[in-house]
Image (cartoon, grey):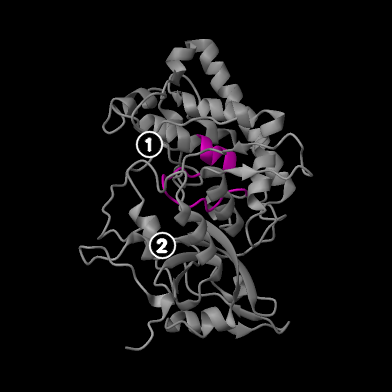
């Protein structure tokens, strides 16, 4: 018998099935998804998957159908897939205050930041940065955003030369500055005027791991009752109906279980990121577009009688407001691990601290008006979604 290549050796169980240890990291991630979280706190496959996103060979590329802006589906040598969102603006560019939220560029670095804000992190801080930050600490601990990592992609070798998408391939050109560019096809920002250009053919972007196919993992989608109207003149129903909140709370699936608390968690997350859209398990596309403008209407859900917040979430937010566990410091330290660090511009980090203070003030006002027990839901010592705040 010839020697078997150990790299391709698979472990077999007594049943004849392969061991989960031999599965690729993207499949381990898929297997670990449940109804409460995308991955467990200590799932080792997540760090390995993040490494795959920046190092796996790209074998094919295609444009993602639908959507207002260009996104690419990238397939890797290990058959994993990720959604690539190319860099369209520099870190310091901000959206003018007169722009509507739905006409802004999608920001690749916001994708990365959203993953780090959302996830459970065990961070061992560098004493030279801050001697008080010597703890293992977590950020929001929701774990509802798929793994995302930044990557520098060679547009010639890793996109143009491997795509079979003729519509995409035909949009490549060389700019007057002798850089490789392309623009693809989409509803907005897909033209020579909005082309994506490399330096000379290197482009930065975010890669978000795919969730399992709908045919393998069926899931339901509920439109958020407090979503915006996406209209320049028309207001959403929640903006004009004073009884809207009470009506929602009496309507399935919001009349029982933890759905309202889940929406509150996502509202907090979205507001901290500066997102004007609230979609569970969706990307944070338009986040961090402004560091100096706080969109107070995004806090529409933080007003009596609608406010209910998990005790675990409230305690964590209070912890992140303390100087020694400051949200901006934790985010900055966490994001240093990404390949395209620095991911965020300092004013955007500081804006997160300001937004956190606004959230805590809103919760405090509601507690003062309605009482602690009527606002803060004790979710400790329960079977699911129990969160331990570590110091």
Q: Which of the marked residues, 2 or 1, is nearer the chain's N terminus?
A: 2
User: Which residue was labeled with disc 1?
Assistant: 225
User: Which quadrant of the rendered structure holds the C terminus?
Assistant: top right
Say if mark 2 contacts mark 1, CB within 8 Å: no
Q: Is residue 98 visible?
A: no
Residue 128 in percent (x, y) is at 79, 44
The quarter of the picture where residue 227 lies is top left
The quarter of the picture where residue 263 lies is top left
At horizontal 40% and vertical 30% (from top left) the residue drawn is 261
Residue 275 among those drawn in magenta: yes
At horizontal 30% and vertical 29% (from top left) the residue drawn is 257
Q: Is residue 55 left or right of residue 260?
A: right
Q: In what element is the residue under mark 2? A: helix
User: Which quadrant of the rendered structure holds the N terminus?
Assistant: bottom left
Residue 320 in percent (x, y) is at 62, 32
At horizontal 43% and vertical 19% (from top left) the residue drawn is 305
- In this view, the residue farthest toward the front is 1
Q: Is residue 190 left or right of residue 219?
A: right
Dominant secondary structure of the magenta stretch? loop
Q: Is residue 65 visible?
A: yes
126 or 378, which is in the foreground? 126
User: Which residue was labeled with disc 2?
Assistant: 26
Q: Is residue 308 left or right of residue 1?
A: right
Residue 64 in percent (x, y) is at 42, 68
Residue stretch in magenta: 268-288
367 or 101, which is in the foreground? 367
272 or 292, which is in the foreground? 272
Residue 58 in percent (x, y) is at 49, 76
- In this view, the residue farthest toward the left is 15
């Amino acid at each position: 018998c010839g020697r078997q290549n150990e790299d391709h050796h698979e472990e077999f169980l007594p049943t004849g099935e392969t061991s989960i240890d031999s599965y690729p990291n993207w499949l381990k991630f898929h297997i670990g998804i449940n109804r409460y979280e995308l991955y467990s706190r200590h799932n080792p496959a997540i760090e390995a998957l993040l490494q795959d996103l920046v190092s796996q060979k790209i074998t094919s590329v295609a444009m993602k159908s639908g959507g207002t802006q260009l996104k690419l589906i990238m397939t890797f040598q290990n058959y994993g897939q990720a959604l690539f969102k190319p860099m369209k603006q520099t870190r310091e560019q901000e959206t003018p205050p007169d722009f509507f939220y739905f006409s802004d560029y999608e920001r690749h670095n916001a994708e990365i930041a959203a993953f780090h804000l959302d996830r459970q992190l065990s961070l061992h801080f560098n004493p030279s940065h801050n001697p008080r930050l010597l703890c293992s600490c977590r950020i929001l601990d929701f774990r509802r955003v798929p793994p995302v990592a930044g990557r520098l992609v060679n547009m010639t070798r890793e996109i143009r030369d491997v795509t079979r998408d003729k519509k995409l391939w035909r949009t490549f050109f060389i700019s007057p500055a002798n850089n490789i560019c392309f623009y693809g096809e989409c509803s907005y920002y897909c033209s020579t005027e909005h082309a994506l250009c490399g330096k000379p053919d290197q482009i930065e972007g975010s890669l978000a791991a795919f969730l399992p196919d709908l045919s393998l993992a069926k899931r339901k989608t509920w439109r958020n009752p407090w979503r915006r109207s996406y209209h320049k003149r028309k207001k959403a129903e929640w903006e004009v109906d004073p009884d809207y909140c009470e009506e929602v709370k009496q309507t399935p699936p919001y009349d029982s279980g933890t759905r309202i608390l889940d929406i509150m968690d996502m509202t907090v997350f979205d507001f901290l990121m500066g997102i004007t859209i609230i979609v569970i398990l969706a990307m944070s596309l338009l986040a961090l577009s402004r560091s100096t403008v706080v969109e107070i209407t995004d806090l529409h859900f933080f007003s009596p009688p609608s406010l209910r917040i998990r005790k675990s979430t409230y305690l964590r937010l209070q912890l992140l407001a303390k100087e020694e566990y400051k949200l901006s410091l934790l985010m900055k330290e966490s994001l240093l691990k990404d390949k395209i660090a620095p991911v965020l511009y300092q004013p955007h980090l500081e804006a997160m601290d300001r937004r956190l203070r606004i959230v805590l003030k809103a919760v405090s006002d509601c507690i003062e008006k309605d009482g602690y027990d009527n606002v803060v839901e004790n979710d400790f010592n329960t079977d699911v979604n129990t969160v331990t705040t570590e110091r």
